[in-house]
Amino acid sequence: MPNPAPTTPETQDATPLAVELDGVLARTDTLHEGLLRLLKRRPWLLPAVLGWSLRGPAFLRAEVARREELDVTRLPYDEALVSRLSEERAGGRRVVLSTVADRRVAEAVAAHLGLFDAVHTGDNPLEGPREEARRSAPGRPFPRTLLKALRVHQWAKNVLVFVPMLAAHKVLNTALLLQAVLGFISFSLCASSVYVLNDMLDLDSDRKHPTKRKRPFASGDLSVRAGLWLAPLLLGSGAAVALLLPREFLALLGTYYAITLAYSLYLKQVAMLDVLVLAGLYTVRIFGGSLAVGVPTSSWLFTFSMFLFLSLALVKRLSEVRRLRLANEEAAPGRGYMAGDYEQLAMLGVSSGYLSVLVLALYITSKEVTALYLHPERLWLLCPVMMYWVGRVWLLAHRGLVNEDPLIFALKDKVSYAVGLLAAGVLLAAT
């Protein structure tokens, strides 16, 4: 927008500077945020919400605002625009918040920012000539923001669908490999749908977090409205790919989505149950790979994965609790953990990690190994390799050097790549 021509204070008072709240002053839509919060806490109100919407946008905004109070102190405001409004008002210009948002929300924002001479909403429109303030600058490029919202880097978790085929030594079977690839794609699309939904439901807690507040929805780089169509689109795409695989895989994918949805809505707030669910979801991916390629998976693999992934889930929680301690905070918002849980989480996590190594050792002595490996005694080398990696991850976690997501840490850690290559070499030598 071109810079306005210089004006006198008298002219400025006659031509107020008006700004819209939704999408301009705040890089979000307060109606959609309110709806998400309301349905997260009281999902049984969905039929009522549909009825309110039939009576018009203003009625819907009023009903949502009456039941759900937004935390206006943490909305993603356009800081450059806020600075301009402050400068204009300091220079004698009349600044007005003129918005379609509900009056309760608008007045709360005005009280928080302290920038406005008047508040006008849909039921009390601003009349007469005025200058409309614009957003100071566009957000991040959409493709980059979209990829960040989908958390494409988290798709690395879904390589677990290839594990049953690898464990059965059928990696060279082209037909099975194609089925495993389809399983990977299906899980990835379904997981991204959950990530989008989870980030929209976690706006409040994410905005209080030092790093999560930069996520696309929390920061306003991606609108909540876009997320409302993106989540079902991803889920439908994942289900469509799953139709190319056995029916059992589609049923498992539906179970996976239901569990992850329950996790996003409630289970992640329950201490210990949350990490058990996370560990179980890793194991579900392995089972999904088994169903996708039609290769049975031994109970040894499931038991090993449960203990190992429980350990990694506890690493993630440990890093969050460590942040609480450093910030002198007592509890994590939206979680069931407190700063005093640090030592207990560490004990449980290390124990779980080394139990997975014990399961591996017991597997090496089982009859299944002799049927798959020509030199099973060489597999014993995997035990010290795993003990080193698990111990190192927890040592670094205590030092605060592990990212909150251990997967991201492993993907950036050269030592983890070296450990992976060494383990692959041991497996090849034993085959």
Image (spheres, rainbow, N blue to C red):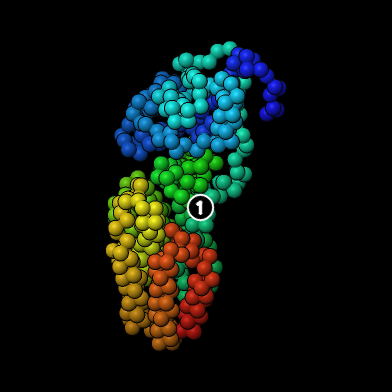
Residue 409 x, y percent position in the rendering: 48, 64
Query: Which residue is found at the position 35% from the left and 47% from the top?
Result: 334
Residue 203 appearing in the image: yes
Q: Is residue 101 above or below residue 141?
A: above
The quadrant in which residue 371 appears is: bottom left
Residue 155 x, y percent position in the rendering: 50, 57
| Residue 264 vs residue 14, the one in the foreground | 14
Quadrant location, the N terminus: top right
Residue 375 x, y percent position in the rendering: 43, 87
Q: Amino acid at mark 1?
A: Arg
Mark 1 burial class by Cα count in 10 Å: few <14, some 14-19, many 20+: some
- Residue tagged by mark 1? 151
Please give left or right for residue 229 compared with residue 286 in the image. Answer: right
The quadrant in which residue 343 appears is: bottom left
Query: Which residue is found at the position 60% from the left and 46% from the top?
Result: 143
Question: What is the secondary structure assignment of the residue under circle 1?
Answer: loop
| Residue 361 vs residue 100, the one in the foreground | 100
